[in-house]
Amino acid sequence: SQNYPWPALPSGADPAWLPPAPERGSLRLKLAGVGPLIDTVRAELAELTGAGAGQLVDGTAEADVVFTTADRADELASGDLAGFDVESAEGLSQEGFAVLRQAGRVAVVGGSDRGLLYGYHHWRRQLRNGTAADGPEAEIHAPATAIRMLNHWDNMAVHPVMGQVERGYSGGSLFYADGALREDLTRVHHYARLLASTGINRVALNNVNVGPLEATLLTERLGDVVRLAEIFRAQGIAVHLSVNFSSPMLLGGLPSADPADPDVAQWWSRTADAIYAEIPDFGGFLVKADSEGQPGPYRYGRDHAEGANMLARAVAPHGGLVFWRAFVYNHQQDWRDRSTDRARAAFDHFVPLDGGFDENVILQVKYGPMDFQVREPVSPVIGAMPGTRLAAEFQVTQEYTGQQKHACYLAPLWSQVLGFDFEGEDVGGGESRRVSGLVDAVVAVSNVGADEHWCGHPFAQANLFAFGRLAWDPALAPEDILREWVQSTYDDVELRDVVVELLRDSWQTYEDYTAPLGVGWMVRPGQHYGPDVDGYEYTPWGTYHFADREGIGVDRTVATGTGFTGQYPLPWAARYEQLDSCPDELLLFFHHVPYTHRLGSGETVIQHIYDTHFAGVERVEEMVAAWETVRHRAPAPVAQRVSERFAEQLRSAVEWRDQLTTYFSRKSGVADEHGRHIHP
Ligand code: BDP
């Protein structure tokens, strides 16, 4: 059940979107430089030539494609790079690269060895698309965000409730099986390569809920981390560990984990020193503290800056970072008390600490104030902490968006969040107040596992790919990224077009048949799959819709509600506060309204609920029909898996539609204008 040893991979599906090398060609490829990442590029080129794409050459000026780094460009200017516009490659950032063209020849110049690796993958996609040799004389690329990271919620052993990968829908862990590191790490090599091809440069190797076994990765199982770090390092990726705040007690035998206790701080310093002695490029720690049962500084009457800074000082001498999560809220609220609001929690806990975190602490904030719902406003924390380094956290794993049983392409959601402007300028707004300009890091929970299609649903690979691409360049259009992904992944042109067509609005479709107008939740408690309108309504988790016979939605206004809208700067505070300026799609996140309230679209809330749920299911039916016309064009295992998943998506969408429309017609007593089959 742990897929161990590795299952056979369907041909053409591994390694996912790294396209197979062209089998015929006469490319003369030259690589100039030395170093470990140069060796990685060399191995990539060897794969191409090994498949028959051409040959590696040594001589000067005879190559069709030259790969090198900016620091050698001068030296090569009169030789290999003669004729190229080498000057445009000056001033490249470390991770940036240039693709230069001259009379059918190409030069890929990296700002550093790592930049060259990214440049190679960019060129490789162009080779696949037939656009490598002709194009602009000089293309310059550089990442918008320095830190582009995936978090793995992998446990070493199978957790009785959460399984091996918490919120994982792709089989077991890529890294661990049966409580230990896997012996065969072949697929970790492939995975690291996949990530590098999208520009990811950091990964955290274990679940943020750190159990006693995983805690030992810090100390007695450090050897496992060393092995994984070697594999990732070869692709320019630094590794991190999620750590348990009580580690000094769990692992060090100390009586407390109080951050103000010098013994505790010393224990962390010694532990960090030992890690860096083995892994000099170790990224640092990731911490979930005082959240959902995890230990943290509150236990000792200390605040989160004190907790984070103590860890930060342990890794600072080695250049390490501490990612400290802002996902802190009371999960044992009194649900009868409407004055508590989980949406407020991160802001209330963290904004007063702005300016108090050390330079190497990055506060990692979920993109919305609740928890990875299909639609949430952007977390106000991101706009309110100018004195703190921030990361925006996303969920590639589809916990609340169909668990990789539903096709749901999430790049449009992420793109909207990254482009959200706290100044409120919709067009031509200040880049610096956009989310992408306010964060130092873009982070997401990974969706891969031991599954032979990597992600459970073969189309969920598009999300992993798109996350990396958007983290690199948040201005990329989600549909263009989707095109890049299908072009890299599938050979058949018609198949590619249909897959783009199926996926491009699938996030919207998923929203249509699930919880309406930003209210969120309505999922089965615990597992978070499938509808259960009142599943969380009377629980302490703080996730309510407040539907009664008159209306629905959460009043989060300053005037009459929880005051959450007041956490935004103007103009958003006012826009969200007022019913008539609150965007339709977030109406029920911010307001409690009667079912007959008219949206900006002119429809009533209740009719909107009916219409979107019927439309959502119709759209899934169209997706299934479109897929049937091309499924024979996909590799057989892909075809089979996608068809299975679509059958389940359709079943589940119908279930959502029927439960939601029935629930709201009975609650409200308002009939569907179109008289569809709803039981009042
Ligand atoms: C929630 C998940 C839970 C995670 C938590 C987190 O349901 O399993 O532990 O987020 O982010 O969405 O820590």
Image (cartoon, rainbow, N blue to C red):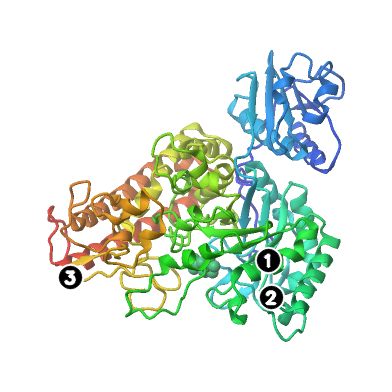
Give the amino acid type for the residue marked by disc 2 in the picture. Pro
User: Badge 2, how many Cα within 10 Å: few under 14, some, many 20+?
Assistant: many
Looking at the image, is 679 positioned above or below residue 283? Answer: below
Q: What is the x, y in percent for residue 554? A: 30, 65
What is the distance, in whole Å, between disc 3 and disc 1 at their CAs?
A: 50 Å
Q: What is the x, y in percent for residue 611? A: 22, 52
* Residue at 73% in and 38% down: 94
Badge 3 or badge 2: first in the primary sequence = 2
Which image quarter is the N terminus in?
bottom right
Question: Which disc, if any, is residue 549?
Answer: 3
Q: What is the x, y in percent for residue 398? A: 48, 58
Residue located beneath label 1 in the image: 309
Q: What is the x, y in percent for residue 605? A: 21, 56
Question: Which disc, if any, is residue 259?
Answer: 2
What is the distance, in whole Å, between disc 3 and disc 2 at their CAs?
A: 50 Å
Q: Are marks 3 and 1 in contact (CB under 8 Å)?
A: no
Looking at the image, is 309 positioned above or below residue 260? Answer: above
Give the amino acid type for the residue marked by disc 3 in the picture. Arg
What is the distance, in whole Å, between disc 1 and disc 2 at their CAs?
A: 9 Å
Q: Are marks 3 and 2 in contact (CB under 8 Å)?
A: no
Q: Nearer the viewer, mark 3 or mark 2?
A: 2
Is the CB atom of the residue marked by disc 1 within 8 angstroms of ligand 1's nearest atom? no
Instruction: Report if residue 585 is visible in the image.
Output: yes
Q: Are marks 1 and 2 in contact (CB under 8 Å)?
A: yes
